[in-house]
Every structure is written in C-alpha cells, then in structure tokens.
Image (cartoon, rainbow, N blue to C red):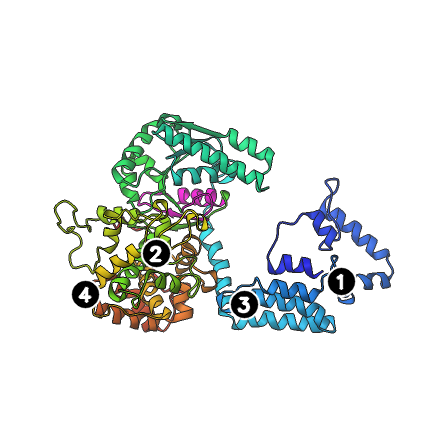
Amino acid sequence: GVRHALDMIVRGRINGSAQEGLKFGFLDGVVSSKESVLEYALRWANWASMLPSTTMESRRLCRRAVPLDEEGIENRDMCDFAFQSLPPKDKGGESAHACLEAIRASFELSSFDEGMEAEKNLFNDLLYHSMQGKAYRHIFFAERSSSSASGRKKNAGNQLGKGKGAVGMIGAGTMGRGIAISFLRAGFGPVILVDVNPKGLEAGVQYIRSTLQGEAKKGRLAPSKLKGILSSLESSTNLSSLADCDLVVEAAFENLKVKRDIFSKLNTIVKKKDALLLSNTSTLDVDAIASSLSPERRAFCAGMHFFSPAHIMKLVEVVRGSDTSPETLDTIRALTKRIKKIPVVVGNCDGFVGNRMIHPYTSESTLLLVDYGGGEAGLGISDVDAAVGPKYFGMAVGPFVMSDIAGNDIGYNIRREKGILRDPKTGQVGSNRKQMRYTELADEMVEKMGRVGQKAKKGWYNYDPKVGKGRKPLPSSEMQALIDKYSMNSPQQGRKLDEGDIVNRVLFPLVNEGFKILEEGIASDPSDIDIIYLYGYGWPAWRGGPMFWADNYVGLSKILSELDKFHSMHPGSEYFRPSKLLRKCVSMGMGVQEYYSNGYAKSQSPTKSKL
C-alpha cells in the first residue's frame, strides 16, 4: 500500500524485518534455517507450476489495484502529508519529489502501463537532465573508489581488517572517547583507554559507558552485545598497558613535542614489531611523528584523522607518511570500513586535505566582515552564515557557527604555532605574518574576550542554555561592536553583499586550494576531495562536493576569472592566486574530474612533508 511505499521509497527506511516484509507484501516467503535459499526457491517454483494460469495471473502486480490504507486514510491525503516534509526541489529534493510523483501515478492513473510510463519518464529526467542526480551518482561511485584497496593481494594473517585485535587508545578527551566507542562497537577487544590524568580517564570511561548504554536503550544496540562490549573496555594511566596491542591510536594534545614523546615510548613498549602506530593529528607532520620510531617501525606508522564527534562522523583521513607501507594503508582502509567509516588516503601536509582547504574559507569569511561590515547596514556574521549555510548554498552550517562548534581557540592556537599572532606581551607581530592580508578580529575575540565558542556560551554568537539547549546562535552586540571597530577604515564599510557574491568570495578560494592539493599529489583524485567535504564538513550532497561543484555548477573559466580579479584586489591573500592546474584545465577546455579520468594527471609518488 501507499503508506509502506512512502516509508520505503521516499523516506528510505531500509531496516524493516523479514516478518514485516511478509506482512506488508514486500516478500512472498522467508527461508528458514532448515533449508537453503535454492531449495526454498525450487519448492516455490514447483508449487507455482501446479497452479492454474488464472491463479498466477491474479498474482501479477499489473493485474492488481493499489489497496486502500489499513487505517482508512486516503492515499492522496498520505501523499499530500508526505509532500510537506520533502526538501525543496532546488535544495536537493528533485529525486524525492520524483519518487512521490511515481507513487501518486500508481493510484491516480487509470492503468498499470500508464503508471509505468510515468515512472520511466521521471527516471529518465533524473538520469539525463538533473544536475542533482548527476551529483548523487558521482558521490556513489566516489565513495566506493576512495574506500577500495590498492588491488594488492591481501595479507591473510592480518586480523585487524576482520575486526579482531587489541586496540590501544591514548587520550580520554573528546576525540579519544569517540574513537574508542567506534572500535568497541565493531567488536574489537580489548580496547584499552589510556590517559595520564586519572580524573580525565574516569570521565572518559563514564562517557563511553553512558553513550553505549544510551544506544542500547534506543534499540540501536542489542542488550546481549552491550554486555560484551563493555567488558572489552579497559582503562589505565600507564602506557605500558599497551604492550600487547595490535593497533594504537594516539589522540593526545595537538602538540608535536607531546606526540613525538608518546611515540618514542611506544617504540619500546609495544612488543609486536608490525603493530600499527597511528596518530589522530589534524594538522601536524606525520613524518616528524614517525621519526620518533625506529626505522623498521615507520612502515607501520600513519595518520588516522577522525572528525569530531568521532563516534558519529563517518570520515577518516588516512594520512600517508613518507615511509608508510602500501600494506599498512590497505589495512587501515579495511579496519576503517570495519568500524563503519569512510577512509580517504591523503598525503602529508599542513592540515592534510580538509583542514588545509578550510583555512582560506574561514579566513576570507572573517575578512569579509572587516571589508563590508559595520553597523546595521553592513555585512553581518549571520549574513555570511545564511549565504553559505542551509538557507542558500546548502552547507550544514555556515563558517561562523562551525567555528563556534569546533572552538575558536583551536584556530587561535594554530595561528600562534605558525608564528602569525601578535605577541600579547611585546606587541610584536608574528614573524610569519609578513605581507599577509590579515585581521586581528578573530584573535582579539579569543584573547581579550574569551569568546571561544559554544563551550563558553559565547563566540561569534551568544548561546543561552535555555534556548535550543544552548546550541542556538544568538546575535551578540559585543561582537557587532568589535566588527564596527575593525571595519571602520574600510572603503566598503557598511555595505551588504548578495548571497551569490558571498559564496564566490569564500568558496572559490577553497576550491582553488583543492586544485593546489591535487597539483602536489596530496589527494590522488578530485573525487577524494569531494568525499572528504561531504562527510567531514557538511557539504550538500546534491552539489556533489567542491570539485564537482566547480566543474558542473559553476564552470572553471568563471572560477579562474573571479580568482584573478580577487587576487588583483587583494595580493596579500595568496589563496586567491589561481592554481596552475586550474589554469591548465581551463586552457584545455575540460573539468578537473575529466582531466583525471582521462589520465592527463601524471602519477605522483607519495609526497614528502610540506611542513
């Protein structure tokens, strides 16, 4: 009936039981443990051969009318109700609307053949004329390509890819807890959580237990499985507890000295010489971390960059070091899929792929406020978020909400480590700022105002625990005053930009950085970048990812022209300088995905550290 068709086809519910399928007519039979599927099918075929032709004809779907709803609701009314919850067609909803139209055709048109013709036309329209349909198909194949192994013969002795082995988790903070949950869910054990801070360790264990227990209460985890999972969790304040591990993931403080010290200790503690020693670093040099290990161990060292919250986000950047072996990469791919996440292998550079591309995006978003902000008439924080976020472009959140969620202190600390910040004691500008186009707006809000984000109830926005559970962005007069201060000398001060202009200014440099990443061999294919942004940064699936969007929605000629214009206006913003690969694709008259698919990109060897 229509009720169940809407549930399965439009809403995409695929977790129904076999018995439910029998009840609702999706299935004719379910095989018991007493016979094979083939034996059962043969029995059904023999039974069917003995039935009169009139009986068989009556069973054909084309001879049957769409049944009335069991609860007496009109089929048309159910479709009208479902329509209200569909995304707009221009915001990724073309396929959902087509599904609903096909269901309507099943009971509104006079014959089965007419209904099938209507469905064929809807299908062909999505296949041949819908850019959203093309984007969804691109993602489907890109995800499978990024997750596939190298094609080498698998090591039959490696059990990690099969969900077996002892896992060490260093760090009981936000990331460590989430990563530990992911391995526990997948059946790894024991999973040993290590943190030198006893209180932090206790809090981490409690969080893991309560999270898994909550999942069991919601029916996402069988009670019998929960007991086994919790018994696999161990904790310690001593790294020596990791001696017998097959895999160790480090998620300590994002400081190179700290991480090198940990890996130096693991070098002597972990007994198995082929144990994987991985770092969850989001920006640091994987080669520098691996250099703390003995040479023979470096082949088994790589980055495994999870995204927060790690037990929810699906993406993992697998960072290839100079000495990481191909077999190690294949094993990490396999175990990443085992914990139900999507691996993308990337090269070693500052920020890898995702965070490296996010830098020009967030930098230019802030500089837009300085250029065009000021007073009620000027460009505001919410204007930029509205243009890039769900209301217009379609990102899950805009750049300023994203920064507040992640913590504005993270970016501040990275800028300090890079030698860009002004020294608060001496007033001296960081040595690496040089002629960079820069604003200290984001520095002052953290350093002097403590506006680090949602965790402090104030960042780019204010947050009230009584409003939206403390996560709803609220306007801040303090931040508006800060924008007024930094924008007062701008010739464009107090002006609005339309949504399209905002999107171009903040997303074109992000795409440009993607081209530079491809040039350097940090990413091996444009589709890998698309998957990273889809699953790690909330890029709208119907736009296909940054590189697909550039090729198909915008056009590389326009992006190149706009980047040239922006760079002439702002020569201090190096991220506006067009990539050589972008210029080459434009000169050849082809998109970057076509360039790679046709083999024009020369094969690149693993890239040395760019740090």
Check whether the beta carbons of the residues at disc 1 and disc 4 lie within 8 A of each other: no
Q: Which numbered disc covers residue 94?
A: 3
The span from disc 2 to disc 1 (Cα, nearest Å) is 50 Å
Query: How dense is the environment of label 4, judged by Cα within 10 Å: few (below 14), some, or many (20 and up)?
Result: few
Q: Nearer the viewer, mark 3 or mark 2?
A: 2
Q: Read off the residue under disc 4.
A: 489
The span from disc 3 to disc 2 (Cα, nearest Å) is 29 Å
Q: Residue 118 appears at what percent x and percent y?
A: 65, 73
Give amino acid for label 4.
Asn
Check whether the beta carbons of the residues at disc 4 and disc 3 lie within 8 A of each other: no
Q: Which numbered disc covers residue 400?
A: 2
At x 39%, y 60%, the residue is 526
Dot placed on the residue nearer the N-terminal end, 1 or 3: 1
Dot placed on the residue nearer the N-terminal end, 4 or 3: 3
Dot placed on the residue nearer the N-terminal end, 3 or 2: 3
Where is 409 relative to 253, above or below? below
Query: How dense is the environment of label 2, judged by Cα within 10 Å: few (below 14), some, or many (20 and up)?
Result: many
Secondary structure of the residue carrying tag 4 is loop
Give amino acid for label 1.
Pro
Q: Which residues are magenta?
A: 308-337
Dot placed on the residue nearer the N-terminal end, 4 or 2: 2
Give amino acid for label 2.
Phe
Q: Name the quarter where the N terminus is drawn.
A: bottom right
